[in-house]
Amino acid sequence: MKRRPKTSTLVVIAAIVVLAVLLTVLAAANAARVKRVSAGLPTDAFHLVTSTGTTTVTREELMKLPLQKVTVTLDTSTTSAKKKVYAGLPLRELFKDLDMPFSADNYSIASGSDGFTMTYLADEIQAGKVWLVLQEDGKALPGRAQGGFGPFLIVTQGEQFSLRWCKYLQTLTVK
């Protein structure tokens, strides 16, 4: 006598197949988005998007600005907490140096090449807690291919964990 699978077993198998197809579609869509976002973007630059348009900001331009040191705690699920000293600019100073208006009505969205996106509110930007960093120990931040977080990294001061950091910055949007 041939044994028939139970209906619940068939439902589980169908759900697994549907999830596998959905995961494949989402992975392809994300790969296409990353490719589209980074199209034409030099490896030493990121896009700054505002209501008036998109500007490419290069490392060369940023190195002309007065970089400051910031000490933050790097603490992830794979590393133990350690103090890091970076060089960069608070976003409020970056926006000021680029003659970009930023007020309490604005906020900023950082997007990395790994697909991670984080929103930063006006009050934390204006308080100087959100930084764009370019250097560690006087050297350019290594990129993803070199096992680093650069070439541009957004960090937040005063956070217990590094959950709100945006590594591999590609796009910084001000809304």
Image (cartoon, helix red, strand yellow):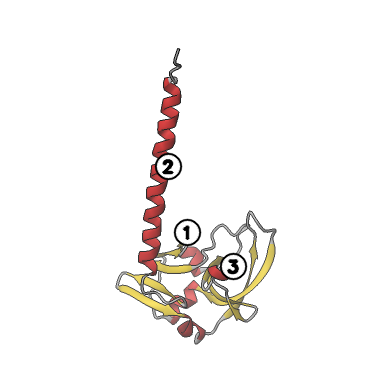
Asked if the residues shown at circle 1 and circle 3 are in contact, with their CB atoms under 8 angstroms apart, the answer is no
Q: Residue at x 39, y 72 (%)?
A: 48
Task: State the CA–CA distance, disc 2 to disc 1.
Answer: 22 Å
64 on left or right of 74: left
Which class describes the residues within 10 Å of circle 2: few (<14), some (14-19), or many (20+)?
few
| Outermost residue toward the front in this view | 1
Q: As shown in the figure, which amino acid type bears the numbered disc 2? A: Ala
Pick the residue in front: 29 or 159.
29
Q: Quadrant of the C terminus?
A: bottom left
Which class describes the residues within 10 Å of circle 3: few (<14), some (14-19), or many (20+)?
few
Place of residue 55 in the rendered image (x, y in percent of width and height, measured from the top left)? 36, 76
Q: Give whichever of discs 1 and 3 has the lower sequence position.
A: 1
Which residue lies under the disc numbered 2? 20
Q: As shown in the figure, which amino acid type bears the numbered disc 3? A: Gly
Q: Quadrant of the N terminus?
A: top left
| Outermost residue toward the bottom in this view | 64
